[in-house]
Amino acid sequence: MRQLVLDILSQPAVLVAAIALIGLLIQKKSSAEIIKGTTKTFLGFIVLSAGASVLVGSLDPFGKMFQEAFHVNGVVPNNEAIVAMALTKYGSTTALIMFFGMIANILVARFTNLKYIFLTGHHTLYMACMIAVILVVAGMEGFQLVLIGSLALGLIMAVFPALAQPFMRKITGNDQVGFGHFSTLGYVLSGAIGSVVGKNSPSTEKINFPKGLGFLRDSSISIALTMSVLYIIVAIIAGPDYIEKNLSNGTHFIVFSIVQAVTFAAGVFIILTGVRLILAEIVPAFKGISNKLVPNAKPALDCPIVFPYAPNAVLIGFFCSFLGGIVGMFILGAVGAVIILPGVVPHFFTGATAGVFGNATGGIRGATIGSFFNGLLITFLPVFLMPVLGDLGFANTTFSDSDFAASGIILGYITKYLGSAGLTVFVLAAVIILVAVYFLRGKKRVSEDH
C-alpha cells in the first residue's frame, strides 16, 4: 500500500489528471466535458514526459562524451540518482512526508497569502526525500519527524512559486498559472539580472536572421542544427574509438552524433506539444478547486510550461548555463573544493528555463547573462549542501537544482546549530506568522469595506 501511494503521488500525469477530474466534478461539468478534460490533461503530461525521456536519452551520451573529451571527474548532480539511493533507506519516511506535505501545501494555500498548489509530483517526491534525509540525520524520529517534515515541505511548495510569480506574469501575460519547479532561485536570479542588464535589448524571439537563413526561425530546425554542431565537436574531441566502442554500438561516430542531436530537437518538440495540451485543459479545470476549496489558488506547473513562450531563449539558456557550469567547475578545482561536474540534463532544464525568465525581463542580454549565472548557482550550491546529507553527502552524485540545495542548507544548518528543537520552533513559527498575517489582512480589508 505504501508503495502504491508513493507511486501514485510521484506520477505527475496521474496527479494532475486527478486534479483536473476533481476540478471538473466540482464545477458540475457534463460527463463528456469531464472525460475530455481529464483525458487530455493526462495525455498532455504523458506526451510531456515522453518528450523529456527522449531528450534525456539523447543527452546521456553527450554527457559521457564530454567527460571523456575533457578528462574530468567529480560529483555529477542528478536528482533521480541521489533519490534512488536515498529511498532504499528513507523510503517510508519520504512517503509519509510527501503525502502529508501535499495536504500541508493545500492548507498553506487556503490559510495564507501563498495561493499556490504545487503539482510537479516528481519534484515533490525529491524534496520530501531530501527533507527526510536531513531530519533523520539531525536525530528526528516518529511523529515530530513527519509533522515538521510535512510542514516544511508544504511551505516550500508554496513559497517558491510565490517568488517566481512576478516573472511568470511577464512571461505568460496573465496571472492564471504558477510555476512549480525546484530551481526557482536560479530563475528569479536570471530574471533579476535581466531587468538590470537588458535595457533596450531585443527579445530572443526577434533575432533577425539573414533572408537566406529564414528557416532558422523554426525553433525545431535551429535546435537540431545547433545541437548537431555541438555534438559533432565534442564527439571529435572524445574520439571515434571511444564513441563507437562504448556508446554507438559500432555506428559511425558522426552519424551517431547527428542522430542524437536531432533526437534532442525531437524531444523538445514533443515537450512543447504536451505543454499546449496541458495548458488548454488544466487551467479551466483547476478553477473548480480554486473557487470551492482554495479561493484564488493557482496551479504551479513544471518548468517546460514556459518553453513555448520563448523557444530561442530555451536553446540560448541551455548553452549559457552549461558554460556557467564549466566555469564554475574550474573555479572549484582552482580553490581545492569538491568538483561539481556540469550535468547536461539539469543544465538543459534549468538553463532553458532561466533563459526564458531572463529574456522576459532583459531580452537577449538577460537570457544569456541570467542563464550563465544560473549555471554558476547550481554548481556552487551543491558544495554547501553535501555536508548536511550524512552518508549520502559522500556519494558521487547529489541534488542538482538550486531550491533543493538552498532548502537543504537552511534546514541542515539550523539543525546543526540549534538542534531538532530549534528547527521545530523555526518551522512552526513560519507557519504561524504566515497564517496570522493572512487573517490580520483579512480583518483589515473587512474593516476598510465597512
Image: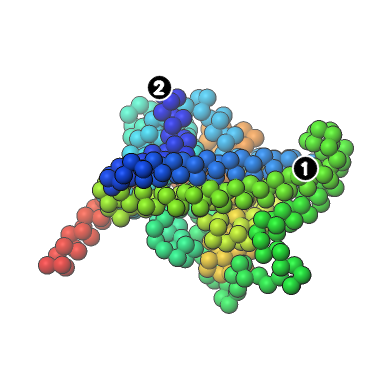
Q: Distance between the residues labelled 1 and 2?
A: 42 Å
Q: Seen in the image, is 46 located left or right of residue 94?
A: right
**Neighbours of disc 2 within 10 Å: few (<14), some (14-19), many (20+):** few
Q: Which of 407 and 250 is in front in this view?
A: 250
Residue depicted at x 77% and y 70%: 212
Q: Mark 1 points at which residue?
A: 65
Amino acid type at circle 2 is: Met
Q: Position of residue 163 (x, y in %)?
A: 43, 57
Q: Position of residue 88 (x, y in %)?
A: 52, 24
Identify whether 348 is placed above or below 371. Answer: above
> Which structural element holds mark 1?
helix
Q: Counting residues from the N terminus, which is met first, the one under dot 1 or under dot 2?
A: 2
The colour style of the image is rainbow
Amino acid type at circle 1 is: Met
Q: Name the residue under label 2.
A: 1
Q: Seen in the image, is 89 located left or right of residue 325?
A: left
Q: How many marks?
A: 2
Residue depicted at x 64% and y 44%: 55
Is label 1 or label 2 in front? 2
> Which structural element holds mark 2?
loop
